[in-house]
Image (tube, helix red, strand yellow):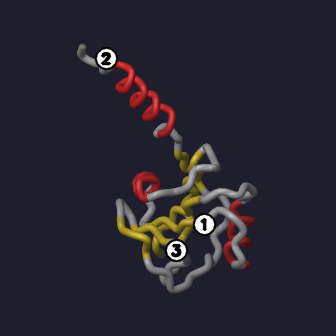
Amino acid sequence: MKPNPWPPLLAALLMVLLTGCDTMTFSQYSGGDRVWPTGSAFTEGVFAVPVYRGWPEKPYTVLGLVQFENPNVDWNRGDMMQAAKKAQAAGGDALILLPKGADPSPTVTETRKQFGITGDHTVGVVVKWK
């Protein structure tokens, strides 16, 4: 007797639908122009634009933020790729990740306050080089 192929196919389809549908949004920054922190960070990788896990060396202007509607999403390589495409589409030259969780860095804490980020989730800052 030949096994029924439908149950495994339906289960796989259901898993794809339930796990791959988190929406990422872009919010334009509307605050005043200011001097944002810089540092000596290397890029996490270059996708549509470079993605930093720290402050880049060059001065920049903030264009906005990209974040998932679901704040519990942990950013993996595919998420960074998606965020980099959104940053590029918004006119950005790079993306700086502000990690979730308690960060001992007062600079990250202050920057999160500047953007009004109150939740404990990762956010990508879309920047344009000066």
Residue extending farthest top: 1
Q: Is residue 93 above or below residue 2?
A: below
Spatial CA distance of label 1 from label 3 is: 16 Å
Give neighbour class at mark 2: few <14, some 14-19, many 20+ (Cα, 10 Å).
few
Camera-side residue: 35 or 97?
Answer: 97
Q: Position of residue 87 (x, y in %)?
A: 46, 57
Q: Is residue 44 left or right of residue 74?
A: left
Q: CA distance from mark 2 to mark 3?
A: 58 Å
Quadrant containing the N terminus is: top left
Q: Are marks 1 and 2 in contact (CB under 8 Å)?
A: no
Q: Which amino acid, mark 1?
A: Leu
Tag 2: amino acid: Asn
In the image shown, does 115 or 101 lie closer to the viewer? 101
Q: How many marks?
A: 3
Q: Which residue is mark 1?
A: 98
Frontmost of labels 1 and 2 is 2
Per the model, the C-alpha gap separating discs 1 and 2 is 48 Å
Above or below, 112 against 16 in this view is below
Q: Tell me the residue that label 3 is attached to.
A: 60
Q: Which one is earlier in the sequence, the residue at label 1 or at label 3?
A: 3
Labels 2, 3: front one? 2
